[in-house]
Amino acid sequence: MYKVIGTSKNRTMRVYWTLEEMGLDYEMVLVSPRSKEVLALNPSGKVPCLIADGEAIIDSVAIIQFLADKHGKMTFPAGTIKRAQQDSFTQFCVDEVEGALWTAAKNSFIHPEEFRVPAIKATAKYEFANAMKTLETRLGDNEFVMGDTFTIPDLLLGHCANWAKGAKFDVPEGPVSAYFERITSRPAYQRAKDKTGY
Ligand SMILES: N[C@@H](CCC(=O)N[C@@H](CS)C(=O)NCC(=O)O)C(=O)O
C-alpha cells in the first residue's frame, strides 16, 4: 500500500492521478506544503512525497516515473529509444511548460513580496506560448505525445494544462486544446479529484 503526502491542488495531484490510472490502492495524507509532516520527509517542505516500502520518495516526476516502471504501465521500458523519446517529452514539459507556469506562480504568490518581480509574468506567458507551438508540432496528428499510448508526459502535460487554465495562460485553439481536453477528461483524473476533494 502506498502512502501519498500532500493536498491535491498542487503537483501532488500528479501522483493521485497516476495511482488512479493504474488502479492501485493508496493512503492519503492531505497535508499542506511546509507542514510538520512534510518537513519531516522533505527538508524543502515541498510536496508531493510518496512512501513506498517504508522509504520516502520526493519530486512528482521521480515518483510517477517510479510507479510507471514498477508496475509496467504508462511507460516504455528503460534503455529503449522509445523511452528516451518519452523522457524527452517529460523534460520538455518540466522545462518549457511547467517552468513558465512556475515562474509566474512564484512571482505572483509563492515568494515573499519583496522578492517578486511581477513584470516577469509577461515573459513567462511568452515562453509558454512558444512551448505551445513546439507542442503542436511535436504532437502532430497523434492521440498522445508518444502515439497511441498514454504515457507519463501526457499526464504531466494534462496537469500543466489545468494549471495554465487556472493561471489564465492562453492555450491555442486547435490540436493542442483538443489534446488537453482528451487528457484532462480521463475518468482517472476525475476519480483522483473526487477522492482528494479537489
Ligand atoms: N519539482 C518538485 C516541485 C515541488 C513543489 O514545488 N511543490 C510545491 C507545490 S506544487 C510546494 O510544495 N511548494 C511549497 C513551497 O514552495 O514552499 C516536484 O515536481 O515535486
Image (tube, rainbow, N blue to C red):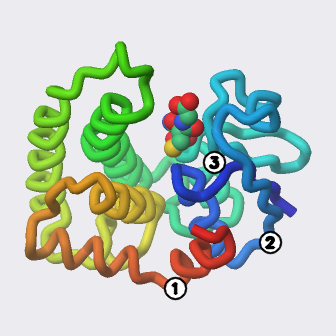
Question: Is residue 21 in view from this perspective?
Answer: no
Q: From this viewpoint, which residue is outermost toward the right? A: 54
Q: Position of residue 59 (x, y in %)?
A: 59, 39
Mark 1 vs mark 3, CA separation in Å: 21 Å
Residue type of the residue flagged with mark 2: Asp
Q: Position of residue 180 (x, y in %)?
A: 28, 71
Q: Which residue is mark 2?
A: 25
Q: From this viewpoint, which residue is outermost toward the top? A: 114
Q: Which residue is mark 3?
A: 63
The answer to which of 51 and 137 lies nearer the viewer is 51
- Quarter location, residue 58: top right
The residue under the point 42% across, 24% down is: 111
Q: Position of residue 12 (x, y in %)?
A: 59, 52
Residue type of the residue flagged with mark 1: Pro
Residue type of the residue flagged with mark 3: Ile
> Does any atom of ligand 1 lie closer than 8 Å to the CB of label 3?
yes
Above/below status of 181 relative to 112: below
Above/below status of 65 relative to 114: below
Give the secondary structure at mark 1.
helix
Mark 2 vs mark 1, CA separation in Å: 16 Å
Q: Earlier in the sequence, mark 2 or mark 1?
A: 2
Q: From this viewpoint, which residue is outermost toward the front? A: 113
Give the secondary structure at mark 3.
helix
Above/below status of 10 relative to 150: above
Give the secondary structure at mark 2.
loop
Instruction: Quadrant for the C terminus, please.
Output: bottom right
The residue under the point 19% across, 35% down is: 121
Q: Which residue is mark 1?
A: 187
